[in-house]
Image (cartoon, rainbow, N blue to C red):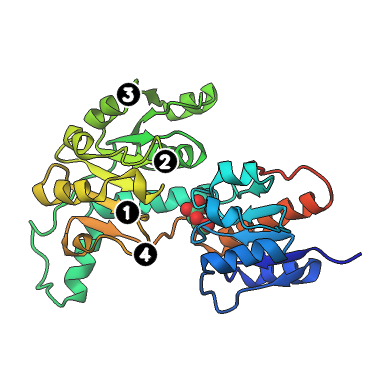
């Protein structure tokens, strides 16, 4: 029997590519240049499976290309806001993602940004890099103590809970959270001594650090807007490792400039990689280039999870991470 044809849109960790090559008739992307819309359409017409990432815009237009051969899109990532899920469903294409394996690494990056923002780490490093550090002074770059402060989590899924665990057990932080959807396990809540807020606004008013962990979508676009930034404490910090469009970046820039909040730590942006250039002019923001899951172990595990999903699909089984 012929091996299924698999097109991979980006360069993946070597172990994953080696495994794919062994199991499938695979087309890799060694140059790692993202595919255009036409190339994505062609991939859907010529492969049985297309392996995508956050940088591939799998729109309704792309999905509606005639004479499709692809039956499954294996997304490398837990978020899948780059794929029009309703359109995929209408076209009868299965979509899978890679939850669980990136939970800890993404929570680590959220914690890193929280610490960087609180302790003005990015600003301090810029001082050294710009050769402007003239020596220690008792009042230089005073930031905020993290230990014992209140962390407010918007969204309380796997990554938020992992961050809460690190913050509570490692930094003695008080945990408050808001979620409109899930009902967290009582054992988790007891372990974290976590308190539920009845609204986002209530959480914003109480938190010293606000960390975003909700998916991107119509209901969360610009969830953090001017009005909500004004509800935060002037000493508070906003951390975003979710998706850029959850925050109105113009409003955030205004808030950082005018001191409505003390700082922000960002890993994700609206229109990546073209972040609003005004962010580069601000001192009170720590900026990372979408590193949430970027560790060798995690990216390999994500690749293996995509493989497990497409292997199951081609073996006629239910893939473990089916989205639609
Ligand atoms: C991924 C992420 O690496 O999994 C996600 O949703 O945000 C990242 O950590 C990236 O999206 C790859 O698709």
In this rendered view, identify the residue nearer to me: 198 or 120. 198
Q: Which residue is mark 4?
A: 273
Q: Which residue is mark 1?
A: 266
**Tag 2, which secondary structure?**
loop
**Tag 1, which secondary structure?**
strand
Residue 237: image quadrant is top left
Q: Quadrant of the C terminus?
A: top right
The label shown at residue 199 is: 3
Which comes before the other along the chain, label 4 or label 2? Answer: 2
Evaluate if marks 3 and 2 touch, with contact meaning CB atoms under 8 Å apart: no
Q: For the residues marked 4 and 1, what is the alpha-carbon distance in whole angstroms?
A: 13 Å
Q: For the residues marked 1 and 2, what is the alpha-carbon distance in whole angstroms?
A: 12 Å
Q: For the residues marked 3 and 2, what is the alpha-carbon distance in whole angstroms?
A: 15 Å
Evaluate if marks 1 and 3 touch, with contact meaning CB atoms under 8 Å apart: no
* Left or right: residue 296 compared with residue 154: right
| Mark 1 nearby-residue class (10 Å; few <14, some 14–19, many ≥20) | many
Which comes before the other along the chain, label 3 or label 2? Answer: 3
Q: Which residue is mark 2?
A: 213
**Tag 4, which secondary structure?**
loop
Residue at 43 percent across and 39 percent down: it is 214
In this rendered view, identify the residue nearer to me: 109 or 259. 259
């Amino acid at each position: 029997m012929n091996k299924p044809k698999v097109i991979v849109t980006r360069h993946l960790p070597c172990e994953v590519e080696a495994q794919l090559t062994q199991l499938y008739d695979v087309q890799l992307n060694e140059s790692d240049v993202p595919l255009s819309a036409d190339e994505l359409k062609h991939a859907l017409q010529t492969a049985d499976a297309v392996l995508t990432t956050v940088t591939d815009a799998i729109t309704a237009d792309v999905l509606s290309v005639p004479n499709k051969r692809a039956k499954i899109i294996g997304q490398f990532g837990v978020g899948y806001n780059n794929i029009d899920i309703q359109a995929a469903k209408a076209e009868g294409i299965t979509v899978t993602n890679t939850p669980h394996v990136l939970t800890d690494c993404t929570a680590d990056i959220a914690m890193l940004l929280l610490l960087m923002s609180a302790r003005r780490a990015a600003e301090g490093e810029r001082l050294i890099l710009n050769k402007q550090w003239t020596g220690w002074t008792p009042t230089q770059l005073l930031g905020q103590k993290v230990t014992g402060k209140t962390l407010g989590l918007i969204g309380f899924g796997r990554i938020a809970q992992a961050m809460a665990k690190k913050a509570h057990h490692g930094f003695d932080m008080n945990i408050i959270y808001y979620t409109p959807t899930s009902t967290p396990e009582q054992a988790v809540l007891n372990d974290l001594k976590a308190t539920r807020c009845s609204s986002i606004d209530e959480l914003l008013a109480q938190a010293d650090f606000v960390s975003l962990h909700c998916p991107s979508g119509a209901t969360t676009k610009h969830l953090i807007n001017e009005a909500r930034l004004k509800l935060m404490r002037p000493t508070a910090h906003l951390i975003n490792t979710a998706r850029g469009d959850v925050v109105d970046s113009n409003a955030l820039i205004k808030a950082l400039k005018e001191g409505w909040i003390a700082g922000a730590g960002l890993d994700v942006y609206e229109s990546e990689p073209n972040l609003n250039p005004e962010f580069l002019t601000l001192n009170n923001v720590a900026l990372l280039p979408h590193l949430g899951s970027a560790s060798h172990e995690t990216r390999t595990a994500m690749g293996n999870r995509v493989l497990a999903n497409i292997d199951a699909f081609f073996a006629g089984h239910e893939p473990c991470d089916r989205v639609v």
